[in-house]
Image: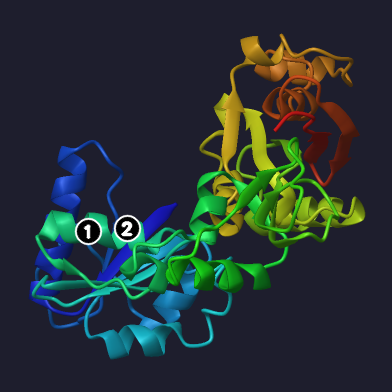
Amino acid sequence: MKKAAICFTPQGKRIIERINSYLEEHGTEKVEAYIINDEMQDKDGFVAFEGSIYEWAESLYKTHALIFVCATGIAVRAMAGLINDKLSDNPVIVMDDAGRFVIPLSAGHVGRANKMALTLAGILDAIPVITTSTDVNEAFSADVFAMEKNLRIVNREGIKKVSAKAIEGKPVTISVKDYPPKERVDVIIADSTDKEYTLLLSPKPYTVGIGMKKNTDIKKAEEVILSILNENAITTDMIYALCTIDIKQDEEALIYLRDRYRIPLITFDAALLNKADGEFTSSDFVKQTVGVDNVCERAAVLAAGNGSELILNKLSRDGITVAIAKRKRF
């Protein structure tokens, strides 16, 4: 996910410069740097944002992790109304412009804000201020486990119950679908309607293959893909990966969908796509253009793995092609 940082003072600017210097030195993508201060002369490497801090936050929050180098109150007010769901919120971090403290404000677990805060604190030799209960009590975190294993949280109310048990120091039991528990367990990993559990984590069963023209409009792509998913009774949290050909990996619409819905984007070169096993809708035009007769179907099947099946063959809409495959092995 892209990261954007904003500051108001020369001290804050130096903090962001230190972060980017470290990231560049270690071959990691730098944060997008913004500044709000009309009187500050030295703005090299920074975008001088002309609107308010509220407008800045709203314009970037859907696709970026946000880093505020300022007072916590400013960040909290800027994010009011934007933060509303711990499972889909993007990371928001605030740090003082002396670089002493780094505080994750939202998406500590699923959005990895806690992990990001620890990394930033390490860069700045600052103190990370982590307040999530499972972290400070060094207890098992169900939502972190689900995120790390790329599992869908089916009944979110179960997170609190499992976490409470872990914080109390009680053992948390986990069962996998191939080994049905003989008695009620805390966490079951299954594609199941069995009710003998506290928390159900489900493998994400679908891959979505996408083909599109260069510079496809972001909003149009989102509208088309979400409508096709809706027509097939699939929600974004059920998608294991978006997939396409490698020459499209920098397409802004795909990057937007990846970051907005936190779905991995997997790309394949033409040679590998040509080796996909199955019968696919062939297009001579596509083959002449990119070297393979079908992108979306082949990419969906490859990403889904052995034994997968196409449940939606290539569907073209407004210059965008979409295919959906269902994984058989998790």
> How many numbered dots are placed on residues in this image?
2
Query: Residue 218 at what x, y percent from top left?
Result: 63, 54
Residue in the picture at 14% in, 49% down: 21
Q: Is residue 110 visible?
A: no
Looking at the rendered structure, the kind of residue marked 1 is Leu
Looking at the rendered structure, the kind of residue marked 2 is Met
Query: Residue 330 at what x, y percent from top left?
Result: 70, 33
The answer to which of 10 and 84 lies nearer the viewer is: 84
Q: Which mark is residue 211?
A: none
Mark 2: few/some/many CA within 10 Å (<14, 14-19, 20+): many
Q: Secondary structure at mark 2?
A: helix
Residue in the picture at 81% in, 35% down: 326
Disc 1 to disc 2, C-alpha distance: 6 Å
Q: Is residue 164 visible?
A: yes
- Quarter of the image where one finds residue 249: top right
Q: Is residue 102 above or below residue 269?
A: below
Q: Which residue is mark 2?
A: 116
Q: Which residue is mark 1?
A: 120
Q: Is residue 48 left or right of residue 78?
A: left
Query: Residue 310 at what x, y percent from top left?
Result: 87, 29
Mark 1 and mark 2 in contact? Answer it, CB < 8 Å. Answer: yes
